[in-house]
Each structure stands twice: as structure tokens, then as C-alpha cells.
Image (cartoon, rainbow, N blue to C red):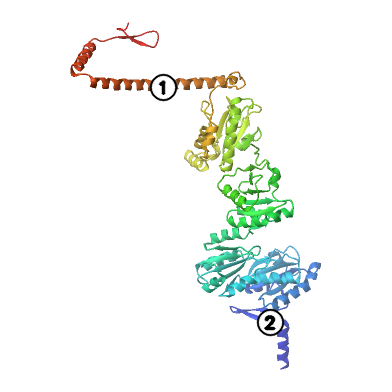
Amino acid sequence: MKYYTLFLEVVLFFALVFAEQGDKKITYTSEVVSLNSSNFKETVENAPQVIVKFFSPSCPHCIDLAPIYKDAAKDVREKNVRVVVAELDCSVNQDICQKESITRYPTLKFYKDGKFKAEFLEKRTVENISNFIVEKSRALINIIHGNEAVEFINSFKTDDQKLLIGYFNRIGDVDYKTFEKFANKHADEFIFAAAGDKQAAEAVGGVVIPGIVMYKDYDEAIARNTKLSEENIEEFVKIHRIPNLDILTKDNLQTYYDTEIPLAIFFYEKDIQYEKHKDDLYHISKLYRDRLYFVATKTVLKDKNRLNKPLNFGIFDPKEPDFFYTFPKGKRMNQSNLVQFGEAYFRNEVIPQIIDEPIKGRVYENDVVALNTKTHNDIVLDEDRDVAVLYYSPHCKYSQKLFPIWEYLGSRYLYQRKNITIAKFDAFNQKIPKASPWNKLEYYPTIVLYQAIDKELMQEEARSQNVTIESYNKGVVVFGQDSVRGLQEIANFIHHTSTHKSKVYLNIMDISKFDVDDEISSDEESSSDEEDLDGDTALERARKRKAAEKKRKEKRLQKEAKKKKAEEEKTKQSGNAKSLPKEALENTKSTKSSKSTKPTKTVKTEGSKATSKDEL
């Protein structure tokens, strides 16, 4: 009896609990288990969950941690958490510590099912260590039934937890297994639960089976998804794990960039400004949940200081880092106007502002990239973009007449997000680099399109000709010297010659507004600064072209008039013949036949008029 009583005391003191796992038994105790080279591998591999403190006896921090770690072990046992709390002395087990990549003391590592899962990195307190163990030991997916679902959801609505619940026809079916696979990948990011009966879905309300629901602590929104492929769950979580309205900081900026969803940004200087618009921004954010993220910031994205205009609100797309779509200046920021602005943005009706900072050498002037000798080749040789360049002289009147058209095209291609750059180059004050694919400037203005490289096509051609793709140069197309430089004509030229077939949508009123007038005014006649580097002045070329067009037009009108007159004569004669008596008609025919027997000869005078001999 004495030995039996002693045995019971030992059992109670160590709080031994045995868990069956196959043929082996794992002991859970409130004491810290000492590991060494003989039992470390066996314990980690066989125990479902183990936390190990790697330490050195000479380390002061390890000495301080010892009582804290011991109290944490007792705390998790009182919570009935099935975990082995262990420690390993690295001074006598260096091989193990080296294999486990221990670089500092103390280090706390959590293992689950024989694999490393997480390292404890917070402040070393009893509460923090205990909470860490409880969180990592929790079942991957909590199975809930019926009315338990509501209680379970409410119990996990805390400040630092996100809950993802799957509702299925049956636990273990195909949809559940897809959900389980996702849970394995994101075990540290969410609390997972699953229900396999209709009663749970009915108790919660508004749930479709199969489906998943995300419950978030930072707002009352509940996000639902019924497409349960692994890819769709990933996309769903990526979008909905972010708050409807957030404060943008340097810490979370990359998270937003990674989503590649545009940001609707409210800039403010005083907190009272944010509080004033907070409710409106929050309500609008729900309308654009899958398309826009609404954020507010004081310090991040100081692009507002690099824009041509001051702004308090706008849209920034991480995929278009050059541009910012600004809320109209002077318009009141209310829900109605914010919705109108959002809809206009998605209809491509908002013209972007250029962020006034050189990006890849690009400097914009009125929506056109201004090239110089240093940046010319870097931009025109961009393999992924077509580049249309206007080579001009600032003193040339024909160049000046073309500027409004060129700037208009620049703005249209920008906000319609075409894969083309509209650029200009002052060829009067600087030289085109010799290494440029094209540098044979002969007159102002000249429009040149540098084509993007179609790599797939070139690879096929390279294989067929047994050469490398590097041997191909970027294609160059020059706008015709005598072509009409109208808005529609230039837009068509870019569309048909560009690799990406970039078609810009033009307003019919804009086409007429930018029609080119070829008439030469008196002040143009006195101009002599529009030099044609090929010999003729631009004025002479325009006059010749105009004269040729006028001559063609006159010939066409003369031909039409002659044809019309002949038709009228024929109609008249036909009418007269019907009105004559039978005898008169026979006399007329005989007269005609007698005349036809006597041929007439025609001769040409020095002029171009042909005259009959009888008339002479």
C-alpha cells in the first residue's frame, strides 16, 4: 500500500497523461522534458505537437527564461493542451542544434507532426509563450455542428483573428478536401472551421452550401464565396482579407501592391479631415470591394507632391506607376460624386495626371514624352512598346500646327492605356543619336514609328533562317512626307503600322476640330524658317501639293459637267423625235444619211481645240 500511495503522488505531481499513437505512447506532463541526442528525433517525430527550447547553460537570457518557460508549461497543461514542452542543451548536443539551424540562444521552435511549423519571436513572457503554444496546437480545422456555429463565430471575434468557415454537404467530400488543402498552406494566417450539416448553415443564415465565409474583426463585413476550387479560394482570400477602409502605411503598402488592385487614396493632413470623410469612404468602398481598395494616408505615396495639380483624392494603379487619376478639383467629396468618379474611371473617361518624376528616363510634357539625346535610344528601343516620335523644330510653323494633334493623341493613348509611347524630339537644337535605328531627318516635322518587337514571330523567323534573335533590329516606319497630317490620318498610321495595332478611339468632334487646312495664308508666304533639308522649302512643297490637288479637282468637275451636258442633249433629242410628224421624221433621217456620206476632217490648232474643216 505504501508503494502504491507513493506511486499515486508521483502521478499527481507530474500530471501524467498518456496519448495513444499507434503502438507508441507519448507522455504529456506539466514539467519541462529534457531532450538529448538519444530521444530528440523520436520525440519530435512521434509526438503530434512539441515545443523545444534550445539553450546554453552559460547564456544569461536562457537563465532568465528558465522559470518563465516552466510556468508556461504548467499553464498549457491546465488548459488541457496536448503538447510536449521540452528543452535541449546545445552545449552538449551541438550536432542537433546545428541541424536545426540554431543561431542564437534561447530559441523556441514548435513542431507539428514531425515537422517544424513556427518559431516564437515575441517578448518572452508566460502569457505570450502560453498563447503561442495554444494557437499552434489548435486543430487545423475545427468541426462544428448545428447551433454551435453561431457560438463558435462569436467566440473568435477578437482583435487579432480572422476566421474562415467552410459549409459542406458532408465532412470529407471533394469540396471539404479542397478547403483542407488550402488550410494546410495557410494554417498560421486563419482560424479554420467546417460544418457538414444544413443546420449549421441555417443557424448562421445567408450561407450557400457548399461555400466559405470569412468573418473579420475590423468591420462588420462578411465575405462569401461559393466557387471552391483551390485557385478561387486563394483569390477570394487575397481580396477579402483586407479591410474595406484602411490606413495606408509603409508596413502594409507592399500587401496592397501585391494584389494588383487599384487603390482609391484619400490624402489628409489633419485627423479631423479623415474623420469628416471616413463614413462616405467606407460606404463607397463596399460598392467597389472587388475592384478598388479604399485607403487613407498622411505619409505614404507622396506622389501628390509630384503631380501637376494638388489633390485630396485619386486612384493609383500599381500596374501603372507613372499615372494618378485625380478627383476633379472643386467638386465636393460626397458619396454621389465619389461614385460618379469611380464609374468614370472604370469607363476610361478620367484623364490621368503624370507623376512628375522621371521613370525609366521618361519626362512628360502635356502627356507627350519629351526625348533628348541621352534618353532617345533607351525609349525608342523599348522592345515591349511601340514608340511614335515627332521630330520637330520649335521655329517651324508646320511643327507648331501639329503640336495640338500630337498632344491630343498623347493624352488619348495614355488614359486608354495603350501599349504605345507618344514622344517628341527637338531635332533643331539637338542631334539624333547615331546609334538610333533611324536618323535620316530630311524635313520638319517628321513622324516616325518605332515598332515593338514581336518576339514570337522573330523566333520563328530566326529558326527558319538559322540566325539568332539578337540579329533583328526594331522596325521603323516613317509617315509619308506628302501625306495629310490630320488627326484621323495620323491615328490610322499608328494603328496600322504598330506591332500592337494600337487603335485609339477618337471623338468625331475632335477629328473635325483638328482638321488640317492646307490653304497657304499671306503671312505663311513670307515665312522662310520651315526648311526642307532636301532642298525645297515646306511652303513650296505645300503649294505644289495644293496645285496638283486643285488641278485634279478641276478635271474631275469638267468631266462630270461634260457627261451631264451630253445626257441632257440626248434626252432633248429623244423628246423632239417623238413630237415630229412621220414625214418630217423621214426627211430628218434622209438629211442625216446624206450628211454622213460626206466625211469631215478635223485638224488641231496650236491650241488644244479641235476644229472641223467645214467650219474653217
Quarter of image, res 397: top right
Position in image of residue 83 (x %, y %) = 67, 74
What residue is drawn where x is 42% and y is 20%?
555
Q: Which residue is mark 1?
A: 557
What residue is drawn where x is 61% and y is 19%?
528
Position in image of residue 336 (x %, y %) = 61, 52
Q: CA distance from mark 2 to mark 1?
A: 112 Å
> Within 10 angstroms of label 2, few (less than 14), some, or many (20 or more) residues?
some
- Classify mark 1: helix, strand or loop: helix
Give me the disc on residue 16. Answer: 2
Position in image of residue 381 (x %, y %) = 59, 37
Residue 59 visible to the viewer: no
Three-letter amino acid code at the position of disc 1 = Leu
- Considering every residue shown, the one lying at the far top of the view is 616
The residue lying toward the viewer, choosing from 408 and 47, is 408
Three-letter amino acid code at the position of disc 2 = Leu
Q: Nearer the viewer, mark 2 or mark 1?
A: 1
Above or below, comparing residue 14 to residue 231 in the picture: below
The residue lying toward the viewer, choosing from 447 and 411, is 411
Quarter of image, res 252: bottom right
Give me the disc on residue 2. Answer: none
The residue lying toward the viewer, choosing from 401 and 211, is 401
